[in-house]
Image (tube, rainbow, N blue to C red):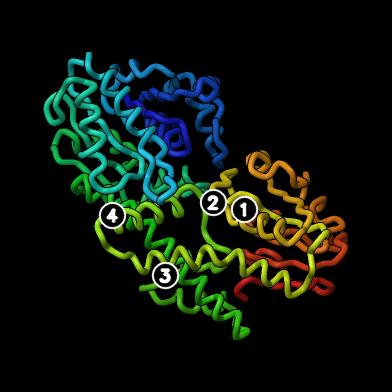
Amino acid sequence: MHVSVVGSGYIGTTIAAWFAELGHTVTNVDIDEDVVDAINAGEAPIHEPGLDELIGDHGGDTLVATTDYADVRDTDVTFLALPTPSEADGGIDLAAMKAGAESLGEAIAEKDDEHLVVVKSTVIPGTTEDVVTPIVEDAAGKTAGEAFHVAMNPEFLREGFALGDFRDPDKIVYGAESDAARDTLDRVYDPLVEAADGDPAIVETGIKEAEMIKYANNAFLATKISLINEIGNVCKEYGVDAYEVADAIALDHRIDEHFLRSGVGWGGSCFPKDMNAIRHAARDRDYDPVLLDAAVAVNDRQPERMLDLLGDHADVEGKRVAVLGLAFKPGTDDIRYTRAIPIIEGLQDRGADVVGYDPVATENMREKFPDIEYADSAADALADAHAAMVVTDWDEFAALNTEFDAMADPVVIDGRRVIERRDGLTYEGLTW
C-alpha cells in the first residue's frame, strides 16, 4: 500500500519507518524542513534505539519526507500523528491536529478515489468524530463515509522500546464505523501480524472506544506505578525493602511483575499529559476522578521525598551536587516531565551548585536549565561533588564504582535502585 503519515515527531517517525520496513511505500509529511531533509538523507530526527538503522535503510527510498500535503493524494491512507500537548488547565491542545486536518482535507479535495483518514494521536473521546472529521469534510468539500472514511488507531509505544513494541504488539486497536475503514487497516497491518513474534489481538471497536482505550491503558499503568511507589514509601518508613515485597506480590498472576519498580516516579510525553487530559475530561462531565488525582499526587511528591532524604545527610547550600540522569527514562533524550526537573529546581532552591549528566539528553536539558553545569561523563559529574542524586536508571550508572571515591562527600540518594551499596558510601534508596 501507499501510506502517508502526517507528523514526524516521536510517533510519526517511528510508525513511518516501520510501515516502510513492512513493505509499504510511505510519504511522511512535516512542516519542519530540517526534519524532512534528515529523513530523506536516511537520518533519524529523534533519538530512539534502532531507529537510525531503520530510517537509514528506507529514508529517501520507500520512505520519503515532504512538506507538501498535496503528496497525500497519491496515498491510500493517512495517519495523523500530530502533537496534542497539555493546556494550562490539563485539557489537550488540538491546534496542530486541527491545522493538519484542514491541510489534509484540502489535499484530498481533488482526490477521486476513496481515502482513509486515521487519527493516531491521543485524543479525548469524541475528538475524531466531532472535531477532526468536520474539519476534513469542510476543507475537502466531501462527506465522511462517502468520499473518505475515518478511523482511530491508538498507539502503545514506549519510548526507548518503540521499535520492539511496534514489531511485536500485544494488541492493535481499530476504532472504525465502516467495513471499508477496517479493511484498509487490515491491509496496512497484515504484514505486521504475519511477522510478529507473538499473536497480537486485533481489537475492532467504535471510534470513541478506541480513543478511550488509549487513556485507560496509560491511566492504569500510571496508577500502578504510583501505587507501588506509595507502598514503597510506607516500606521505607518501616525499614522494609520494597523491592523484596514487589518481587513476592508479582508472583500473583493477578498483579504481575511489570511496573512494580518503585522509585522517583513517571514522566515523559504520555503519562503526565494523558493523566491530565483524562482528569480534565472527567471534570468536564462533572465527575471527580479521585483515584487518578491521587496517582498524580503521589507521583508529584516523589522528587520532594528524594530531596528530603538528601537533607537528612547533607546541607547542600553552596555545595556541588551531581544529578545523574536527565532524560525521563533510559533509551531516550526526551526530558518532558522528567523527574530530574523538580530535582534540579529543588536543589537550586536549597542553594546547591548543580552539575548534570546524561548520556544523550544534555542538550535538551540545557535549553531548560542553561545556567547549571553539565558534565561530559558521570565520573566528571561526581568529581568533588558533596552529593549525588540518581534520577534515571541508565545501565552505565550501575557500573559506577571507584568514581564515587572522587566525591568530596560520598552521599548518594538513589531514586531508581541502580547504584550498589558499598563501604565508604552514604547510600539512601528512595523506597528501600
Residue under the point 37% across and 69% down: 291
Q: CA distance from mark 2 to mark 4?
A: 24 Å
As drawn, 78 above or below 430: above
Foreground label between 2 and 4:
4
Taking 15 as reference, is 199 left or right?
Answer: left
Q: Amino acid at mark 2?
A: Tyr
Disc with the residue nearer the chain's start (4 vs 3): 3
For the residues labelled 2 and 1, say whether their Cβ atoms are less than 8 Å apart. yes
- Residue type highlighted by circle 4: Asp
Q: Nearer the viewer, mark 2 or mark 3?
A: 2
Q: CA distance from mark 3 to mark 1?
A: 30 Å
**Precedes in sequence: disc 2 or disc 4:** 4
Q: What SS does tag 4 mark?
A: helix
Q: What residue is pinned by disc 3?
A: 256
- Number of numbered discs overlaid on the protein picture: 4
Looking at the rendered structure, the secondary structure element under dot 2 is loop
Q: Is residue 302 above or below residue 169?
A: below
User: Disc 2 to disc 1, how far (Cα)?
Assistant: 7 Å
Name the amino acid type tagged 1.
Answer: Ile
The image's mark for residue 284 is 4
Q: Mark 1 or 4 closer to N-term?
A: 4
At 65% across and 54% down in the image, what residue appears? 394
User: Of helix, strand and loop, which one carries label 1?
Assistant: helix
Numbered badge on residue 341: 1
Mark 2 or mark 3, earlier in chain: 3
In contact (CB < 8 Å): disc 4 and disc 3: no
